[in-house]
Amino acid sequence: MAGSGNRVVTFMGPMKMELQTFDYPKLITPKGKKANHGAILKIVTTNICGSDQHIYHGRFAAPMGMVMGHEMTGEVIEVGPDVEFIKTGDLCSVPFNVSCGRCRNCKERHTDVCMNVNDAVDCGAYGFNLGGWQGGQSDYLMVPYADWNLLPFPDKDQAMEKIRDLTLLSDILPTGFHGLMEAGAKVGSTVYIAGAGPVGRCAAAGARLIGASCIIVADTNRARLDLMKNNGCEVVDLTKDTPVADQIEAILGKREVDCGVDCVGLEAHGCGPEADSEHSEAVINTLIEVVRAGGAMGVPGIYTDADPKASTDLTKKGQLPVDFGKAWIKSPKLTAGQAPIMHYNRDLMMAILWDRMPYLGAMLNTEIITLEQAPDAYKTFSEGSPKKFVIDPHGSVKKAA
Amino acid sequence: MAGSGNRVVTFMGPMKMELQTFDYPKLITPKGKKANHGAILKIVTTNICGSDQHIYHGRFAAPMGMVMGHEMTGEVIEVGPDVEFIKTGDLCSVPFNVSCGRCRNCKERHTDVCMNVNDAVDCGAYGFNLGGWQGGQSDYLMVPYADWNLLPFPDKDQAMEKIRDLTLLSDILPTGFHGLMEAGAKVGSTVYIAGAGPVGRCAAAGARLIGASCIIVADTNRARLDLMKNNGCEVVDLTKDTPVADQIEAILGKREVDCGVDCVGLEAHGCGPEADSEHSEAVINTLIEVVRAGGAMGVPGIYTDADPKASTDLTKKGQLPVDFGKAWIKSPKLTAGQAPIMHYNRDLMMAILWDRMPYLGAMLNTEIITLEQAPDAYKTFSEGSPKKFVIDPHGSVKKAA
Amino acid sequence: MAGSGNRVVTFMGPMKMELQTFDYPKLITPKGKKANHGAILKIVTTNICGSDQHIYHGRFAAPMGMVMGHEMTGEVIEVGPDVEFIKTGDLCSVPFNVSCGRCRNCKERHTDVCMNVNDAVDCGAYGFNLGGWQGGQSDYLMVPYADWNLLPFPDKDQAMEKIRDLTLLSDILPTGFHGLMEAGAKVGSTVYIAGAGPVGRCAAAGARLIGASCIIVADTNRARLDLMKNNGCEVVDLTKDTPVADQIEAILGKREVDCGVDCVGLEAHGCGPEADSEHSEAVINTLIEVVRAGGAMGVPGIYTDADPKASTDLTKKGQLPVDFGKAWIKSPKLTAGQAPIMHYNRDLMMAILWDRMPYLGAMLNTEIITLEQAPDAYKTFSEGSPKKFVIDPHGSVKKAA
Amino acid sequence: MAGSGNRVVTFMGPMKMELQTFDYPKLITPKGKKANHGAILKIVTTNICGSDQHIYHGRFAAPMGMVMGHEMTGEVIEVGPDVEFIKTGDLCSVPFNVSCGRCRNCKERHTDVCMNVNDAVDCGAYGFNLGGWQGGQSDYLMVPYADWNLLPFPDKDQAMEKIRDLTLLSDILPTGFHGLMEAGAKVGSTVYIAGAGPVGRCAAAGARLIGASCIIVADTNRARLDLMKNNGCEVVDLTKDTPVADQIEAILGKREVDCGVDCVGLEAHGCGPEADSEHSEAVINTLIEVVRAGGAMGVPGIYTDADPKASTDLTKKGQLPVDFGKAWIKSPKLTAGQAPIMHYNRDLMMAILWDRMPYLGAMLNTEIITLEQAPDAYKTFSEGSPKKFVIDPHGSVKKAA
């Protein structure tokens, strides 16, 4: 049974995360309504995400005191009276998007743009200032519409054995995968993945899973590139003076790829001489250059028009100087936005459970930490660590190992 | 049999089109190679397109002396020895994209980005400085890869009766339709079409054909808006001070639509107080605003990074200040570029032949003209005429009527 | 408020329907569980369906005393405590498939094969011996998972004006449409629709809505064929000695069509000399013959392996002698089964509300009847009437007109 | 340059294949027309296919003296004057379907049902009595429409190193893959593959390539099942008395899979007590049973209505007693027919060239043989050998190794 308190990682302003103790969660929505459809989870794993870093850096507006965390896996310890199929004791992955399962968009599988869970915009998420849903870098979490949202693992023991992989199902593995799907990736595709952070690494793992041919990952971070190189990927080093297309040609014999995925977002840096400074449009314009005519781009990397630290006149308005003129003649297709996790998480779970991604752990390079270590991990991650940090609030992963 | 000469509409610099006489075309490619796969057509109809206007205005770089025209319908009067299925006497629609039918992209139905017909870029077209293929606002035209490219009409007499509609198959009807398809339009969709020029009008007709529900066409041109209004569309008047989303709400009861189509391109004007001046990014950013979360946008309107008259620092670089930050949270999908005509022309031909678009003629408001009248028609069209000009070089349409 | 009773059309054995009075429905599932997610509807319209006829004829096993009806439209008069978005007073269309909105299949938009609403098979429906859900040819109806299942009309007065068309959204319009979609129908397609009953007529109307070109409807019933012919369709008269392919050739100039839709099901008759007798495989094998190589077939017409009156050795086993050998070389695609109504009903509603199907009423030839007239209407329908019978239990349609 | 003769494997009646010497091929079609679009290939590898076995067994009607072989890879040694992009010296895979690249079906990527290469039916193939195209179990082969049909490998030396895998691109790897795609297989899918012959083994390899989860292969042949088991697949032994669904449940914990692929065709045997005898409908009906509601089936296994040895009254008519009644309620989707090889071969080539199928060789268990050994290999294959026989007419593979 649950304790009296709930330790939570709290945003206390840019570069400041604190562990605080909140009340144990209730079956109540952010707007104070009874959530008979909800469930309370005892968190088993809860990861720190690259998008948490945007908040940490003060680049994605969030209120002081907001509880962080949107990548949760947990055991159901309480269900509301309207929950029929999820049972106490189920070990479940929580899709990071909060969705109702009852609006037009949810019915059309667009759970990334649910119309009922956020008054401000058609999009909800935990710990993200998108509807007020409390984050889950914590001991316990309330999940609304539990029958709709939760993905139960078929066998708890088997799941705990593979928990380092399964913990990625709440966000970054489906997110990277969504980027690939929107980029039209399939068997034999050549893929350029911008960013060797955790989402980029998941995109690379996903590309391998679906039988993509040449998988190129680009970054300015040497340690992350080495991790990719040691795990069967080609790499583009953006700090080099060699232009990206030249580096691709050296790998592939062609200057263009079939598919491009932006796993970076608004804090993008430039290439070569501009690798040291932020150029928010750099990734988008590189994709436009290196994706072949008739190819496509997926942009799960986050952009916003509410960046408190935007530095140029355009980014202050939420605008990017996009190479649209160069793009047009190439018949480009671009899809941006959050991944609808539920579209992919069951399929990817099955692939993990049947051992189809043996390389996933090595590519992610996961470190299990305690809740107390979380604030420090934000800092280490921010400094470019090639690790994925997974918080184990109750020591469940340790115990299972 | 063909005469000794070939009258052609020639680009002699911005705002200057001239009728000249060239040699009768030969089965020779722009690079001087024998085109045994080609056919010579006696032109029956050849339309003036909105994209011709970009060239006319000096906004899409083209060499002096270039023969204009990419919307051709004609009768085959000669075939090369490797043409097997197209026969002399066939009345055919010519897709404006030149494509080889043998490269990867053609095999994958991306005839808009054929890899073999233009050394400069993976994209070819007649009369458009894209591979040097001579335009067809003329008496005769050489069509390469005739078996692949040409769409023969099943019955010549029937076709001549419906020639005012069928002449649209070479470009603008499939182009508008492609915009709709890429915008995800289907039965019941609410659609916002930017631009009431001929492509926009075809998009509106296409939306009606597929059973879209609310079809809204936006423009600054009152005569063109009236034409749309009189033919069953809703209209947004961009010269009004009422913001676009407010005008949509007044029509639909909602501030957003399912699908957006840009039938304007780089010469876009702003709205309200900015309706008088060019704002190349205006249409794209309006679509980002008015298309609902999870919706999509098709951009058949032309953009280029080689606009000799670009006026802002960004457009000189081929860049647009895109509202990417506002867009991202809405999970947008955007597809730009030329339509692969061959993907749609047979289907649309069938719809026309079985009388499924009785409104098409009225919406297009076609005027049949002679080749001699073409230079003047460029001017009239440029001044905002709500007509579609169709050149009838040999008087065939007149005779048939 | 509701009265004390609920008049219902009851199946009392083959060829015997009776009007009985049941209790007013409760928010209780067929298994006796509280349905807080449910709503009670006061029925506004409830149609008699061709599939009801299979039950009436004793060809689809059903228990004595089963309440008939799965095509309901009604006003919400009571909602369970867990219904959040549907409100009392909403006028709604009820998809005939009962689905939970919480299982894998519902999440993947396959509401036709919901896994949670019927213990016997992954498929539930009202009034159909598929999960025990009480039918709605009645005064009142309980709809489970109301937020998920119900489609509210945006404006009640507008809806009552168009109620003769909107009443088709609960089943046959989406069902015919699903057949078309699975048959690959789109703009310009040539379509062969087997059966001129209400589903076949809806398929024909749907084909027109999406811009199909040549729409051929086949039947043995002259009155129904005449109705189709008078409403812009081509017809194949199966009682003629002229083979179907010959009749198609006379219409189209070709012996094959792009798409085939089976709107008949197990009570199919043969053609020509066999038009008088039942040949359950006749429609399937005709589609195999007349659909072109690479084309597709949709089979919304019902087949079952529990036909109490099956007459041949094969049909007793639920088997059909299918021309699989002839089919294979043509690369056929066939999709059978119930339509997932929710996939289409909102889109089709929008098309109706924006007047995109002005021909629908004439093609359906609807007659509004009282509940008392329902048993007779079963008989009239069974005898081949070219009408669609719509029951108006409370006289609401009459009042609105 | 080519020698004076062309050794060919010739069908001399059921169970009788002979090596004969024909003339060196000419650029002439079966109808005697000049094929300027064609190329002559010196065969590097040419495989014996399971479908050749249907001919060998006298189950697929073929004329005496027909040259066998449709799985060819070869070096171009001569091109017709209309061939522009394929060059002498190119090492190419030949899709087994003969297609023109100019008809409606080819333009729509349905090269399996080309309308121009066979007068009898819309479908052509080498060595298969489908248009008279001479087979390629020979020294040399004429390939029509060479620019369209041939897939050149990017690097000849690299290709020769991987030739045992690349030789599968002409038919069985894309064929098995097509079965998967039509069965809706994707990441995480559970797949049941009927048949552990070469096509079934390729389907299993393809399922692994795309990240399917549980891959079950069924056969009556123990040696083939062992081969699959040793290469990471689950197996169902059809000779066991345990019903198929029970065997699946023992593997998967569920009695149904997501996807079913028929890699057997008309010579199917039954299960358990019926495993010894032919039951042409057995595979289809097993798929109907074990594929879940809403799932799909791909049927690349061959069926025909011209089986000279058909034994039942139904199969003599090309009919199968299909469990259609049981199927219907499950909303099944079934796609049969030849694979359009060109749809997949380039993608699969890329996957092979980038080492994404390291298991392919072991799963196929290829034996390289000479042309002289081919007639014996037909016999060995027919007796159930778990090998794939690849003929190396000129000793090229031997030399390269």
Image (cartoon, coloured by chain):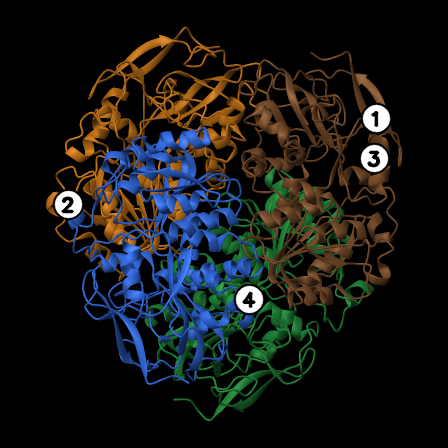
Chain colours: A green, B brown, C blue, D orange
Q: Which residue in the structure is indicated by mark 2?
A: C312
Query: With respect to residue D291, does B115 lie above or below?
Result: above
Q: Residue furthest top?
A: D4
- Label 2, label 1: how many angstroms apart (C-alpha)? 75 Å
Q: Which residue in the structure is indicated by mark 1?
A: B372
- Residue C395: quadrant of the picture: bottom left
The amino acid on which the numbered mark 2 sits, given as a three-letter code, is: Thr
Contact? badges 3 and 1 (CB < 8 Å): no
Residue C150 is situated, as x and y percent measured from the top left of the image, at 45, 70
A330 left or right of D71 in image:
right
Chain of residue at mark 3: B
- Label 4, label 1: how many angstroms apart (C-alpha)? 56 Å
Q: Which mark is residue C281?
A: none
The amino acid on which the numbered mark 1 sits, given as a three-letter code, is: Glu
Bin the neighbour count of mark 3 within 10 Å (Cα to Cα): few under 14, some 14-19, many 20 and up: many
Helix or strand or loop: what does disc 4 sit on? helix
- Residue A384: quadrant of the picture: bottom right
Residue toward you, D202 or B199: B199
Chain of residue at mark 2: C
Query: With respect to residue C354, does C19 lie above or below?
Result: below
Bin the neighbour count of mark 1 within 10 Å (Cα to Cα): few under 14, some 14-19, many 20 and up: some
Q: Which residue in the structure is indicated by mark 4?
A: A112
Picture residue at 69% right of the left edge, 81% below the top: A13
- Label 4, label 2: how many angstroms apart (C-alpha)? 52 Å
The amino acid on which the numbered mark 3 sits, given as a three-letter code, is: Ala
Helix or strand or loop: what does disc 3 sit on? helix
Q: Which residue in the structure is indicated by mark 3?
A: B377
